[in-house]
Image (tube, rainbow, N blue to C red):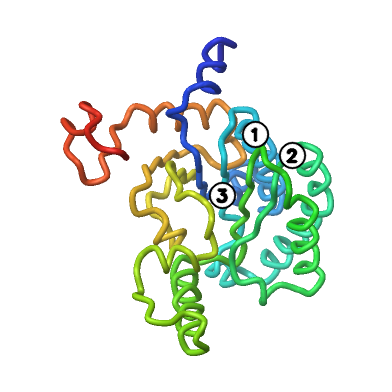
Amino acid sequence: MPAEESNNLESDNNNPRHIAIIMDGNGRWAQKRFMPRAVGHQAGVKAVRKIVEYCAKHKVEVLTLFAFSSENWRRPETEVSLLMALFMATLQREITKLDRNNIRLRFIGDRSAFSDKLQQKMIEGEAQTQNNTDLTLVVAANYGGHWDMCQAVQKVVKKMATGELENQVISEQLINQHLSTAGLPDPDLFIRTGGEQRVSNFMLWQLAYTELYFTTTLWPDFDQNSLEDAIKSFKSRQRRFGHTSEQVLNKSVNL
């Protein structure tokens, strides 16, 4: 991509603030090459590095990656074990690099199903990078949209029962404040690689007005040019949030 075009992407305030990605296709990428699925997952980690680097360089505020869903436990035990080992190895290798590049790491999802060692490494990663400001990298691990909404409601109900919240109307704002993504902007752009066209229980509440982008590219092949294509598609769309095109074009509303 020409340098001046890339600079335009960086300076354009119409770029998405928050990009959320389902990284699909690691196993199929490996199978197409007659290699074990594990090789595909390892190649997927390399793709993550490229996308994180791009988002940090181009001033994306938040990048959320769906690393492991609450449904992924249904996969063969050997593959789940491999994914857990790869997750741990990646954290051990990458946390210091993220910190050095001023990237904040945050995890969302139910951590209780993970080993104590992995949970501790997640806590350490968040603590080490908590003051970084260039990019927030959110890793969704053992995450599901249904779980997220349920745990938010449970927190609200508990606070009401203990008197921490009194005479409080249950509103969208209140639910937002108790979701695992509290404090973050909702995704502007959702990307799913690998050819499937569904959101698969990912950030169901937060994706209400998100622009969706699906590609047949398998995740290990999804590179910075692929991401730029997705962002260009995003920028070609008119986001109305319930208003008319005329209102948006005349700038008579605040989006």
Q: Which residue is drawn at 25% across and 29% down?
A: 251
- For the residues labelled 2 and 3, the Cα–Cα distance comes to 16 Å
Q: Check the image and name the residue furthest to the bottom.
A: 161
Query: Measured along the vertical axis of the image, is residue 188 above or below residue 227?
Result: below
Query: What x and y, as percent, mark residue 65?
Result: 58, 50
Asked where in the image residue 85 lies, by quadrant, the reply is bottom right
Determine which residue is flagged by label 2: 102
Which badge, 3 or 1, is on the more N-terminal residue? 1
Q: Which residue is nearer to you in this view: 1 or 237?
A: 237
**Amino acid type of disc 2?**
Asn
Residue 8: which numbered mark, if any?
A: none
Query: What x and y, as percent, mark residue 132?
Result: 72, 44
Query: Measured along the vertical axis of the image, is residue 82 above or below residue 104?
Result: below
- For the residues labelled 3 and 1, the Cα–Cα distance comes to 13 Å
Determine which residue is flagged by label 1: 56
Q: Residue at x 67, y 33 (%)?
A: 53
**Amino acid type of disc 3?**
Thr
Determine which residue is flagged by label 3: 64
- Which quarter of the rendered picture does the N terminus lie within? top right
